[in-house]
Image: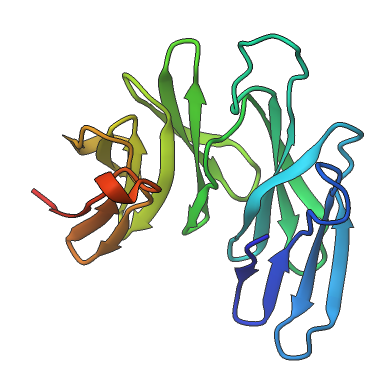
């Protein structure tokens, strides 16, 4: 999986040994390539690591998913139960874990001691963005959309940019208050923010109907 890289280390996990079976996170020294530690999450059978590792200042974060098993036609890629683990960067020891119903549609974002986790509630087709305190896993605030999943949280300064349904929105990192939202009219790729401008690709994966948009702060 895509590694999380800090000044001295690279954190990742391997999904190639057995499909949906890997529960080990490992870290290698960037200078030598040697393993510093390997941590196996105690989540039991049926769980597997998902998305990618996210690195913070003292902890790294990884999600484990246990999907619902059903032969029906109503299954969703966001169904199941997910647990978010904080591991000490120095040792791999679990500092805390946080259980969520359903699945996070995209990896969380980290800045200044806070982890931002986007969610989708398919029954109501609404999304939530949770701000999680890195030290103890407590919920600092929650922002809720009127429609659609929250995807690709991206932090720039004191603002977190999110895709919510077919909109791009900007939310204050301090309190979760929305500053603005813009209807795009299509699904969007992860925003890239430079200065006061956010860049997004519309309709990613569909080259025949995809655009690059630059959106400036109002």
Instruction: State which quarter of the image contains the N terminus.
Output: bottom right
Q: Quadrant of residue 214?
A: bottom left
Q: Is residue 175 visible?
A: no
Residue 184 vs 208, above or below: the answer is above
Query: Which residue is nearer to you in this view: 207 or 198?
Result: 207
Residue 70: percent from the left, percent from the top? 75, 14
Instruction: Determine the residue positioned at 44% across, 33% down.
Output: 141
Residue 21: percent from the left, percent from the top? 86, 44
Coloring basis for residues: rainbow
Instruction: Determine the residue positioned at 55% across, 47% down.
Output: 107
Which residue extends farthest left?
218
Residue 187: percent from the left, percent from the top? 33, 37
Q: Is residue 91 visible?
A: yes
Left or right, 54 with reference to 158:
right
Query: Which residue is nearer to you in this view: 44 or 15?
Result: 15
Left or right, 165 with reference to 58:
left
Instruction: Determine the residue positioned at 21% across, 32% down.
Output: 185
Residue 103: percent from the left, percent from the top? 61, 30
Instruction: Determine the residue positioned at 69% across, 9% down.
Output: 72
């Amino acid at each position: 999986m895509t590694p999380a890289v800090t000044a001295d280390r690279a954190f990742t996990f391997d999904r190639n040994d057995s499909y949906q079976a890997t529960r080990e996170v490992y870290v290698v020294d960037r200078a030598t390539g040697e393993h510093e530690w390997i941590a196996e999450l105690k989540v039991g059978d049926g769980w597997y690591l998902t998305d990618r590792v996210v690195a913070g200042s003292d902890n790294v974060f990884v999600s484990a998913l246990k999907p619902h098993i059903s032969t029906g036609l109503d299954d969703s890629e966001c169904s199941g139960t997910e647990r978010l683990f904080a591991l000490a960067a120095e040792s791999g020891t679990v500092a805390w874990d946080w259980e969520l119903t359903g699945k996070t549609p995209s990896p969380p974002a980290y800045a200044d001691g806070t982890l931002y986790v986007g969610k989708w509630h398919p029954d109501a087709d609404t999304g939530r963005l949770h701000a999680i305190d890195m030290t103890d896993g407590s919920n600092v605030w929650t922002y809720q959309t009127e429609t659609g999943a929250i995807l690709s949280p991206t932090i720039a300064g004191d603002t977190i940019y999110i895709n919510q349904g077919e909109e791009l929105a900007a939310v204050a990192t301090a309190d979760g208050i929305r500053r603005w939202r813009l209807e795009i009219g299509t699904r969007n790729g992860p925003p890239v923010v430079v200065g006061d401008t956010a860049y997004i690709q519309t309709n990613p994966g569909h080259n025949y109907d995809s655009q690059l948009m630059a959106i400036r702060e109002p």
